[in-house]
Amino acid sequence: MLTASIHGSKIAIIGCGYVGLTTASILSLCGHTITCVDIDTEKISNLSQKKLPLYEPQLKELLFNASKNNAIQFVNDLKQALDSEIFYICVATPPKSGGSCDCSKLYSVFHDIVRECSNTHSLKIICIKSTVPPGTIRKLYNVVQEKKETLHVVYNPEFMREGSAIDDVLNNNPIVIAAESQEAIEIVEKIYSAIIHSNSTIIKTNFETAELIKYSWNSFSATRIAYVNELALLCRSLNADISLVIQGLALSEQLLPTDALKPGPGYGGSCLPKDTISFANVLEKNGLSSSIIHQVINSNQNHVAKLIADIFALLGTHKSQKTVTLLGLTFKAHTNDIRNAPSISIIKALLDKGIAVKAYDPKATNTMSELFPKVEYFDCPYEAVKNTDCIVVLTEWDEIKKLDFEKVSKLCHKKVIIDTRNMYDIEILKKQNFRCITMGSKCAL
C-alpha cells in the first residue's frame, strides 16, 4: 500500500522553469512542503534570494511567501530532496533539429530518481509533468517494472497559459492523471484536493491517452490560432471585418460544441464538402494556396481511404469471393441525404474489387439504389448481415445502435465489425467472439 500522507506531503519539484515554479506555488497553496531542485546553481541562488527568473502574475508573491514560511526551499542536489514522497519532474523537452522531442533531460532525471531511491523501502511516486510524445511514459514505467522498484510512475501533464497560469490551474483547467496503479492515481488526485471544486474536471486514464490529451490540446489551440490568422489575411484582401468574422465563428460552438465532437467515417452532406472546396478556391484566389482548409479536405479524403484499406485488410485474400454489409448509408442519422456520404466512396471501392455489397438504411435505400443497383438492399439489418464477412457501421441510426449481437453472431459468416461511430459495448461483442475495429476507442480488439 502507498503510504504518502495526503495533507502536508513532502514533494520534490525537479526543474525550476516555468512549469516547475508554477507547480511548486500551487502545491504550496495546497498545504504541502516543497523542495525545488535544479542543477543551475545561479538560478537556485537567485531563487533563494527571492529573485524570480521569469515573470508570471501572482507567481512571485505565492512562491516567496511560501519560502518565507519554509514551505518551499531551493536546492541544487537531488540528494537533498530524497525524503520526498512524490517527485514531480518538470524539465524541458524541447524539439530536436529534425522535429522530434528531446527527452534527454527527462530520462536523466528519471533515472537519477530511480537510482537514488533504489534502497528505500517506502513506496514513492514519480509524477511527470513534462510534455512528451505518446509512448514515453510507458517506457519509463517499464524501467521501474523491470527493476521491481518500490516506485509508482504517474503522468500528470500541465495545462496553463503564460500570463494566466495561476488562475488557469486554480479555476479553469482539467487535472489529468494517468497511471497503472489506482492507488497512485488516488494519491495524486488528493494532493490537489485543496484546489478541486465543483466545476473541476478530473480525467483518470492510461499513459497514452493522457499524452495525447496534452498534445492534442496544444495542437488544437495552435490550429485555431493559425486558422484565425489565415482568416485575417483573407479579410484584409476582401475588405471584411475579422472581429465580426470571429464573433460569427464563435457561434458555431452552439451547433457543434467541442465536447460533442465524435469520430466517424468522414464528413459528408450538402454543406461541408461543397463549401470547404469552394472556400479553398476563394483562399487560393487571394494568395493562400496551401491553407488549413486545403489540409482539411485532404485529411477527410485520406480518412475515408484509410477506412477502405481497413476493410480490405480484414477481408484478406480472395476478396472477390467476400461479402461486406454496410449498416447506414446517409452521412449522418435523421436524414435521407446521401450527398457526399462516405458510403458512396466505400461502395465504389468494394464493387471495383468484385466484392459483394449488402446494405441497410431506414431512409436512404431508394436514392442509393439509383446510384448502385448492384448493391443488395434490405429493409431489416438482420437480413443484411446474413452470411456476411464484414460488417461496417457508418450511421448512428437507432435501429443499428440497438442490434442484438447474440442474434447477429448466428447470422453472419465472419464475426468482424468496423464500428466507425464507436457505438457498441465492447464487452457485449467480446461475449459473442466478435473482432471489432473502432475509431480510436480503447476498446478496439
Image (cartoon, rainbow, N blue to C red):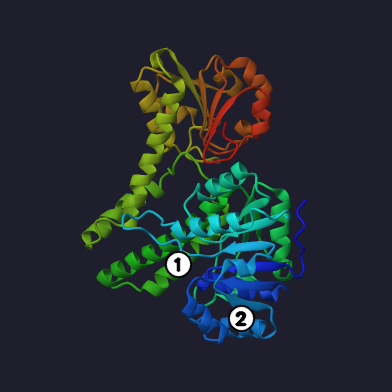
Query: Is residue 281 found left or right of 75 in the rendered image?
Result: left
Disc number for residue 248: 1
Q: What x and y, as percent, mark residue 238? A: 27, 69
Q: Quadrant of the C terminus?
A: top right
Q: What residue is drawn where x is 33% and y is 70%?
A: 232
Query: Is residue 280 found left or right of 110 in the rendered image?
Result: left
Q: What residue would you read off at disc 2?
A: 63
Q: What x and y, as percent, mark residue 1? A: 78, 50
| Residue 12 higher or lower than 331, as above or below | below
Q: Amino acid at mark 1?
A: Gly
| Residue 164 higher or lower than 213, as above or below | below
Q: What x and y, as percent, mark residue 66? A: 66, 81
- Marks 1 and 2: which is nearer the front? 2
Q: What residue is drawn where x is 61% and y is 81%?
A: 63
Q: What residue is drawn where x is 59% and y is 58%?
A: 113
**Element type at mark 2:** helix
| Residue 175 higher or lower than 237, as above or below | above
Is residue 34 in sight in this rendering?
A: yes
Is residue 156 in sight in this rendering?
A: no
**How would you rate the neighbour count of disc 1 (Cα within 10 Å): few for under 14, some for 14-19, many for 20 or more?**
few
Mark-to-mark CA distance, 1 and 2: 41 Å
Q: What x and y, as percent, mark residue 43? A: 49, 79
**How would you rate the neighbour count of disc 2 (Cα within 10 Å): few for under 14, some for 14-19, many for 20 or more?**
many
433 or 114: nearer the viewer = 114
Q: What residue is drawn where x is 57% and y is 23%?
A: 379
Q: Amino acid at mark 2?
A: Leu
Place residue 197 in its image quadrant. bottom right
352 or 176: nearer the viewer = 176
1 or 2: tag closer to the N-terminus: 2
Disc number for residue 212: none
**Element type at mark 1:** helix
